[in-house]
Amino acid sequence: MRYEREVLGQMLTARTERLGGDMLVEITGGCAPHIGSVSTAYYDGGELRTETLLLPGHRDDVVGDRFAGRLARELGCAVTAVCGIHYESPGRQGIEEIVGRAMELLEEIVSAEKKS
């Protein structure tokens, strides 16, 4: 599935794919989509764990960790979120808007998955 929002004149996109009982989600957007972080959330002995690979100079884990953790909790499966969002000099308010719109996408995904 593909989910989109426009943020600061650029598209923010989340794509989901079921891999057996697990989920892969890709969150990209802005003027230079890329891979900035990889976050995997999974249950180990009943406890939710999140492991994150963050590339140097990136902060994409802020969004990727939220997607992986929330979806793993809601769906009860392993979720890997690959995240790469880049906007040129968005400022603090712009960053808040980007993260807020990303969370809207996350809520849309959760809602769609609960219906399926």
Image (cartoon, rainbow, N blue to C red):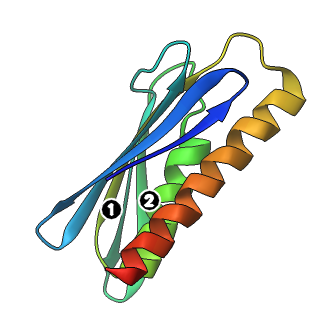
Neighbor class of circle 1 (other Cα within 10 Å; few <14, some 14-19, many 20+) is: many
Q: Position of residue 38 (x, y in %)?
A: 38, 41
Label 2 close to label 1 by CB (< 8 Å): yes
Q: Foreground: 31 or 91?
A: 31
Measure the C-alpha gap from mark 2 to mark 1.
5 Å
Task: Please identify the residue farthest to the bottom as the structure is shown.
Answer: 46
Is 96 rendered above or below residue 29?
Answer: below
Q: Read off the residue under disc 2.
A: 68
Q: Relative to 65, is 15 on the left or the right?
A: left
Residue 62: which quarter of the image? top right
Is 73 rendered above or below residue 85?
Answer: below
Q: Is residue 48 visible?
A: no
Is 72 rendered above or below residue 102?
Answer: below
Residue shown at 54% from the left, 59% from the top:
106
Report the amino acid beneath label 2. Answer: Ala
Instruction: State which quarter of the image contains the C terminus.
Output: bottom left
Report the amino acid beneath label 1. Answer: Val
Q: Read off the residue under disc 1.
A: 79
Residue shown at 41% from the left, 21% from the top:
34
Q: Earlier in the sequence, mark 2 or mark 1?
A: 2
Neighbor class of circle 2 (other Cα within 10 Å; few <14, some 14-19, many 20+) is: many
Q: Position of residue 23 (x, y in %)?
A: 26, 62
Q: Position of residue 115 (x, y in %)?
A: 39, 82
Is 71 rendered above or below residue 66?
Answer: below
Residue 53: which quarter of the image? top left
Which element type, helix, strand or loop, lies under badge 2?
A: helix
